[in-house]
Image (cartoon, rainbow, N blue to C red):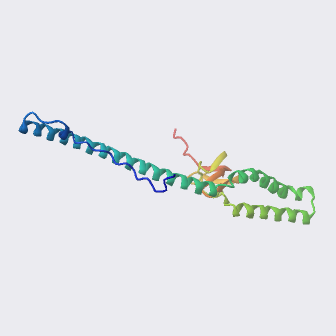
């Protein structure tokens, strides 16, 4: 026969040691037993307090774990196209070069116009994925998003400014995919006195 009823958790059995040991003197044994019971109660309270603290820490750790995993899931969805975008950026660069040099090669206008259209569609597709160009020309130089390959002194600037973009930079949402390769104008240094 199988038991179809749910089993209830067993409750601990409490044994009253006072009943098993008869005191030698009626007044003296009761005080000693009372102190022993108080000590047992204090130990149980300490044990329960420690268990409650462990539970609270464990619950907090679990909440942090859930929050961290949820954020990782959001990030993995948001940046799922990162590898594809990094792979396609050099292709876009080559298409732009082809458009730039096509008139020099005497290529037919309809072919050049077709290349322009492909470049625009390519840029639109990357934009739909969340890929945006990094602002560069006319912006203050920012080493976090710009890679300077040359610089020149200028009287026209007060801080380092990007004056030319040699290769565009891109970011996916807030993550940099590739820095913009730029030329920078530096403020002219005063001539040493002497």
- At horizontal 49% and vertical 56% (from top left) the residue drawn is 4
- At horizontal 59% and vertical 51% (from top left) the residue drawn is 142
Tag count? 0
**Horizontal relation, residue 180 to residue 36: left or right:** right
* Location of residue 119 in the rendering, given as x and y in whole percent from the top left corner: 80, 61
Considering depth in this image, is 142 or 23 the residue closer to the camera?
Answer: 23
**Horizontal relation, residue 167 to residue 56: left or right:** right
The outermost residue toward the top is: 24
> Can residue 167 be seen in the rendering of this structure?
no
> Can residue 69 be seen in the rendering of this structure?
yes
* Location of residue 102 in the rendering, given as x and y in whole percent from the top left corner: 88, 57
* Location of residue 173 in the rendering, given as x and y in whole percent from the top left corner: 62, 58
Considering depth in this image, is 44 or 178 the residue closer to the camera?
Answer: 44
- At horizontal 82% and vertical 56% (from top left) the residue drawn is 95
**Horizontal relation, residue 48 to residue 29: left or right:** right
* Location of residue 76 in the rendering, given as x and y in whole percent from the top left corner: 62, 54
């Amino acid at each position: 026969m199988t038991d179809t009823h749910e089993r209830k958790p067993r409750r601990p059995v409490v044994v009253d040691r006072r009943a098993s040991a008869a005191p030698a003197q009626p007044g003296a044994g009761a005080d000693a037993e009372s102190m022993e019971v108080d000590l047992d109660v204090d130990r149980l309270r300490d044990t329960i307090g420690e268990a409650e603290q462990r539970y609270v820490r464990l619950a907090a750790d679990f909440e942090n774990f859930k929050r961290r995993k949820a954020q990782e899931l959001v990030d993995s969805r948001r940046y799922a196209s990162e590898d594809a975008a990094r792979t396609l950026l050099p292709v876009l660069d080559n298409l732009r070069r082809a458009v730039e040099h096509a008139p020099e090669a005497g290529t037919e206008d309809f072919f050049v116009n077709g290349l322009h259209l492909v470049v625009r569609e390519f840029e639109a597709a990357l934009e739909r994925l969340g890929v945006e160009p990094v602002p560069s020309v006319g912006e203050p130089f920012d080493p976090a998003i710009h890679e300077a390959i040359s610089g020149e002194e200028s009287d026209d600037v007060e801080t380092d400014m990007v004056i030319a973009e040699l290769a565009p930079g891109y970011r996916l949402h807030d993550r940099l995919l590739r820095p913009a390769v730029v030329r920078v104008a530096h403020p002219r240094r005063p001539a040493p006195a002497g």
